[in-house]
Image: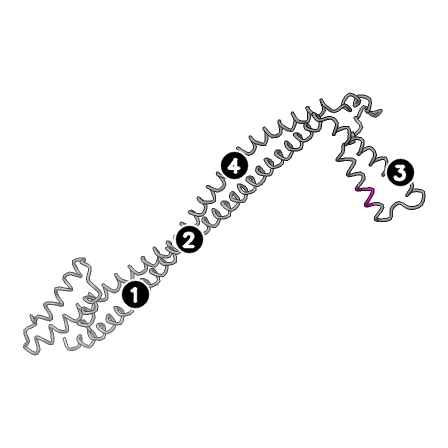
Amino acid sequence: MNDVVPELKRLRGISDLKATNNRDIRDGLNGKMREHIGTRNTFNSEVRELISEVQHQKGIRDEANGTVREAKSDRAEKNQEVRTAKDRVRELDPKTEQRGAQNDRRGRRDKEDTPASLRRKIEALDREFELGKHTGSNEKKAMHTMKALKRKLRDMAEKEDSNVELKEARKTLAEAIDAQEASHQIVEEAAKIAQEAHDLMLRLSEEVDKLREQADASQAQVRRAKREADRAHQTYIVSLRCLHSIHDIIRARDNRDAGIDSGKSTRVEVQDLMSKLMSGETLSTDELMALQRSGG
C-alpha cells in the first residue's frame, strides 16, 4: 500500500491539473459563445431595421404608383382637351381651306407659318446679324426677309385680333397645352419617386440577405462553441470524479493509519456533492470549485 500512495498522489496532481485546464477551456469557450451571441444579435437587429425601411420604401413606391395611375388618367383627359382645342382652332382658321393646295410634289404638306414660328425665324435672323453672318449683298437680302417676316407677323396678328373666336380658341389651346404639360410632369415626377423607392428596396433587400448570412454564420459559431464548451465541461466533471476517487482512497488509508473516524462532516458534505454529481445533477460553479479544492 505504501508503494501505491506516491503514485496515487502523482495521479491526483495530474487529475487536478486536468480539471483546472478543462475548467479554463470551458470558461473560455463560454466567453466566446457569448461574444458570438452578441454579434448574432447585432446582425439580427440590423436586419429588423432594414426590413422596416424596406416596408417604408414599399409604402412610398405603392403610393407613388397610385399617383402615376391617377395622373395618367388625368393626362389622358388633358390630351383629349388639347386635341379638341386644336380641332377648334383648325375649324376657325381661314387658312385651313388653303392647306390642300400647300402640298409639295411628294404629297407632303408644307409646314404652315404661325405667329410662334414667325417669331422664332425673326429671332434667328437677329442672332445671325449679331454674329455678322450677313454682309454685303447678302445683308440686303436678309433685311428684306426680316421685313417680310415682321409684316407677315403683323398681318397675322391683326387678323387674329379681328377674329375673336379664333383668338379665344388659340387661348384655350394654349391653356390646354399648359395643363397637359403639368399633368405629364406629375406623371414623370411620381414615376421617378416610385422607381427610386423600388431601386432602394432592392438594394436594402440585398443587404438584408447579406446580414442574414452573417447572422446565420454567427449562430453556427454559437452552436460550435457551445458543443466544445459542453465537451470541456464533461471532461472537467470526469477529472473531478477521478480526483475525488483518488483522494478518497488516500484519505481512507491516512485515516486508517491514524485511527481517525472518516465520517466527519466535511467529508459528508463532499460526498453529498459527489453523489449529486454522479447522479447527473447540475452543480453550481462554487460547488464545483469546492469539490476541486477538497480533492487537491
Q: Amino acid at mark 3?
A: His
x and y percentages locating residue 251 in the rendered image: 13, 73
Q: Nearer the viewer, residue 126 or 34?
A: 126
- Label whose residue precedes the other's in the sequence (1 or 4): 1
- Label whose residue precedes the other's in the sequence (3 or 1): 1
Q: Nearer the viewer, residue 109 or 245?
A: 109
**Dot 1: element:** helix
Q: Residues within 10 Å of mark 2 (few under 14, many from 20)?
A: some
The residue under label 1 is 27
At 75% across and 35% down in the image, what residue appears?
A: 116
Between label 4 and label 3, give the one nearer the viewer. 3
User: Real-space Cα distance between discs 1 and 2?
Assistant: 29 Å
Between label 1 and label 2, give the one nearer the viewer. 2
The residue under label 2 is 46
The residue under label 3 is 144
Locate the C terminus by quadrant: bottom left
Q: Nearer the viewer, residue 122 or 253?
A: 122
Locate the N terminus by quadrant: bottom left
- Label whose residue precedes the other's in the sequence (4 or 2): 2
